[in-house]
Image: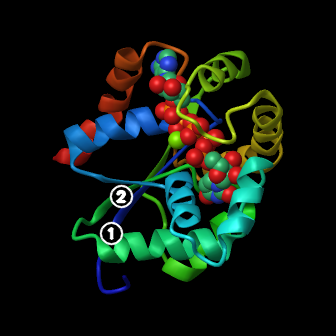
Amino acid sequence: LSEKKVTVVFVLGGPGSGKGTQCANIVQHFGFTHLSAGDLLRAEIKSGSENGTMIQNMIKDGKIVPSEVTVKLLQRAMQDSSNDKFLIDGFPRNEENRAAFESVTGIDPEFVLFFECPEEEMERRLLSRNQGREDDNIDTVRKRFKVYMESSLPVIEYYIAKGKVRKIEAAKPVKEVFEAVKTIFTPLKE
Ligand code: UP5
Ligand code: MG
């Protein structure tokens, strides 16, 4: 990875704020590769890896999986890709994640795309998603919100202080949110 110069955008925001939905649109229009940390962890569970049970239990409890596991999955996905532009969705979720990614990969994100959304709206979306995610039940959703407030928001504050956060109002229809996203990515094309 060190010989390859890569562009990384971290896509952050609360559970159900629309990170995955908007990343799919960004991939279509701007040629990024989408790496959802949550999707990589869920694939790891399915693959029957030795960490699978631990990961599954942590996700069910809304807890943050140890950085070494997640960073390894992200790093492998970037190495295996022929692309050099990545959206890293749902990571880093705490200070430990942030520091581990930086020290292991040496990558500093280009910017952080931050989806801001009221909790009531996120809760509504998660509880009506119906895609069989084991963490989309009211008990786990509450735990996810608590972990987000306590551990993930400080990471966003860290990047705000560095002038790297591009904030999007995410409680609007998908198309309107994407219009705002576009204005941020369009200058990168030049
Ligand atoms: N929807 C989307 N946009 C909408 C809009 N504008 N208007 C109306 N509806 C909209 O969207 C959620 C739902 O809302 C969908 O039904 C969508 O159609 C609708 P989605 O785009 O999926 O939102 P997203 O922000 O991606 O929500 P997600 O649930 O994936 O967010 P989380 O951050 O909670 O989930 P993630 O998969 O990243 O992580 C899950 C768990 O994995 C974590 O809780 C944690 O336990 C673990 N994890 C780690 O430990 N470490 C990591 O680094 C990452 C994850
Ligand atoms: Mg998602």
* Viewer-closest of 23 and 167: 23
User: Which residue carries the number 1 mark?
Assistant: 6
Quadrant, the N terminus: bottom left
Q: Position of residue 113 (x, y in %)?
A: 48, 41
Q: Tell me if I can see residue 3 in this picture.
A: yes
Q: Secondary structure at mark 1?
A: loop
**Circle 1/circle 2 CB separation < 8 Å:** yes
The quarter of the displayed image where residue 124 is located: top right
> Which amino acid, by three-letter code, is at mark 1?
Val
> Which amino acid, by three-letter code, is at mark 2?
Phe
Cβ of mark 1 under 8 Å from ligand 1: the answer is no
Q: Position of residue 183 (x, y in %)?
A: 31, 29
The quarter of the displayed image where residue 120 is located: top right
Name the disc covering residue 86, or none: 2
Q: Secondary structure at mark 2?
A: strand
Q: Would residue 18 be found to the left or right of residue 23 on screen?
A: right
Q: Earlier in the sequence, mark 1 or mark 2?
A: 1
* Residue at screen point 21% across, 38% down: 29
Q: Position of residue 163 (x, y in %)?
A: 55, 47
